[in-house]
């Protein structure tokens, strides 16, 4: 199991800057709440650029592969948005950049 530090930009979101601004705190709180129920994630962070309607999300995920880590990350973000009543049509087109760093240091395991 490795720890993945994942960050993604979601661009050109289908909402106004005001709506996006209003999502900042609820999305952050939703991810923090999800962290309490999913032992394989931690340390969520959300940033918003109102000018270009971009959402930046950071999350740490414990997973066996980069593909699994990205899948968990994207599922957490999307399900939290849905929980807030935000539809995500064109989800794949919103994801403009996903980057990750990996650490396989056993001392960093989330479940310690």
Image (cartoon, rainbow, N blue to C red):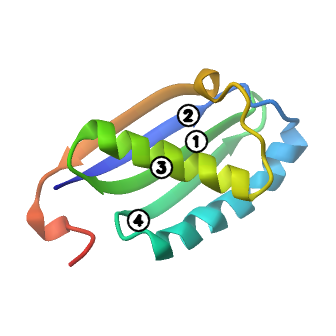
C-alpha distance separating marks 1 and 2 = 5 Å
Give the percent coordinates (x, y) of residue 73.
45, 47
Q: Report if the CB atoms under discs 4 and 1 are less than 8 Å apart.
A: no
Mark found first going from the N terminus, 3 or 4: 4
The image quadrant where one finds the N terminus is: bottom left
Task: Please name the residue that numbered disc 1 is placed on.
Answer: 56
With 95 as the anchor, is 43 left or right in this view?
left
Above or below 74: residue 84:
below
The image quadrant where one finds the C terminus is: bottom left
With 4 as the anchor, is 1 left or right in this view?
left
Mark 4 residue crowding within 10 angstroms, few (<14) / some (14–19) / many (20+): some
Q: Report if the CB atoms under discs 1 and 3 are less than 8 Å apart.
A: yes
Give the percent coordinates (x, y) of residue 33.
58, 72
Secondary structure category for the residue under label 1: strand
Mark found first going from the N terminus, 3 or 2: 2
Q: Point out which mark residue 58 bears.
A: 3
Asked which quadrant contains residue 9, the reply is top right
Give the percent coordinates (x, y) of residue 8.
49, 37
Q: Report if the CB atoms under discs 1 and 2 are less than 8 Å apart.
A: yes
With 112 as the anchor, is 60 left or right in this view?
right
Q: Point out which mark residue 42 bears.
A: 4
């Amino acid at each position: 199991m490795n720890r993945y530090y994942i960050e993604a930009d979601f661009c050109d979101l289908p909402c106004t800057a005001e709506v996006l601004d209003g999502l900042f705190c609820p999305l952050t709180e939703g991810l923090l709440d999800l962290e309490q129920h999913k032992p394989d994630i931690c340390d969520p962070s959300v940033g918003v650029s109102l000018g270009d309607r971009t959402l930046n999300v950071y999350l740490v995920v414990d997973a066996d592969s980069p593909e699994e880590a990205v899948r968990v990350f994207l599922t957490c973000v999307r399900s939290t948005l849905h929980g807030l009543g935000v539809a995500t049509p064109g989800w794949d087109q919103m994801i403009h950049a996903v980057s990750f760093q990996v650490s396989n240091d056993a001392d960093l395991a989330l479940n310690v």
